[in-house]
Amino acid sequence: MARQLSPGKLVIASHNQGKVREIRDLLAPYGIEPVSAGELGLAEPKETGTTFAENALLKAHAAAASGLPALSDDSGLEVKALGGRPGVYTADWAERQWFEGDAGRDWYLAMGKVEGLLAEQGPDVDRSAAFVCTLALAWPDGHEEVFEGRVEGQLTWPPRGAKGFGYDPVFVPLGGTQTFAEIEPAAKHAISHRADAFGKLVAAVFGGQ
C-alpha cells in the first residue's frame, strides 16, 4: 500500500510556475499547499536518468532535501517505429544548438525530426505513439512512490492546431480525429498522460481521505 500524503506543504520539483499552478489546482481538494522548488531557491539537478522514472525520482529526492515531501514529473513522447524515441530526450530534440545565439527550443524542429525519421521508413510505417508521464513522490526520509500515466495515439503530418504545446500538433489520441493542439485544453487534460498519472497518484496516496 502506498504511503498516504498528509495535508500541508508539498514541494513541486519544478521552476515552471505554470506547471506549479496546474498541480496546485489538482491537489487543492486534498489540503495540499504546493510550493515550487524555485520559490525555495532549490537548484535543478541534472537529469542523467535513462528512464522517465529515474529522472522524476532524481528531481523529487533533490527537492525533498528541503525537509518537505516533494513531487516531480518527467514526461515525453514515445514513437513505436523509432524504438521508443525520443523518450526521455523529448525536450532535447527541440534544442537549437546550431550556432551561438540560437539557443532555446523549437518544437516544430522537433516534430520535423520525428517525421523525417518516420518518412525514411516508407509510407506504410507504423505511426503509433504514446505520451508518457511519470510522477514521483519523495519524502525527506527517502521513501518514494512512482506513478505512470499514458495516452496512446497516432502521429499525423503536417502539424495541426494552436491550442497545445510541444508535440501536441502532431498527436491524435486513440479513437479521436483531432490533435491535442486542436481540442480544447480542458478536454485534453481529461484524457492526457498527466491526468492518468495524477488519477493513480490520488487513488494511492489520498485513498483513505
Image (spheres, rainbow, N blue to C red):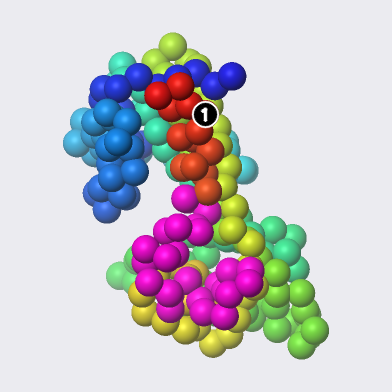
Residue that appears at 45% across and 22% down = 208
Residue 184 colored magenta?
yes
Instruction: Pinpoint residue 172: horizontal percent, then vertical percent.
Output: 57, 74
In percent of width and height, residue 33 lies at: 24, 31
Q: Would residue 202 be found to the left or right of residue 152 on screen?
A: left
Q: Which range is magenta? A: 171-195
Q: Is residue 42 visible?
A: no
Q: Is residue 126 visible?
A: yes
Residue at 70% in and 74% down: 127
Residue 197: x and y in percent read 52, 44
Amino acid type assigned to the residue bearing label 1 in the image? Ala
Q: How many marks?
A: 1
Taking depth in this image into account, of 95 and 131 the one nearest to the observer is: 131
Q: Which residue is mark 1?
A: 204
* Circle 1 Cα neighbour tier, 10 Å, few/some/many (<14 / 14–19 / ≥20): some
Identify which residue, 115 or 186, lies in the foreground.
Answer: 186
From what the image shows, is residue 95 above or below residue 59?
below
Q: In this view, which residue lies farthest toward the top?
A: 141
Residue at the image position 80 percent from the left and 84 percent from the top: 124
| 48 up-or-down from 75: above or below | above
Toward the front, the furthest residue is: 209
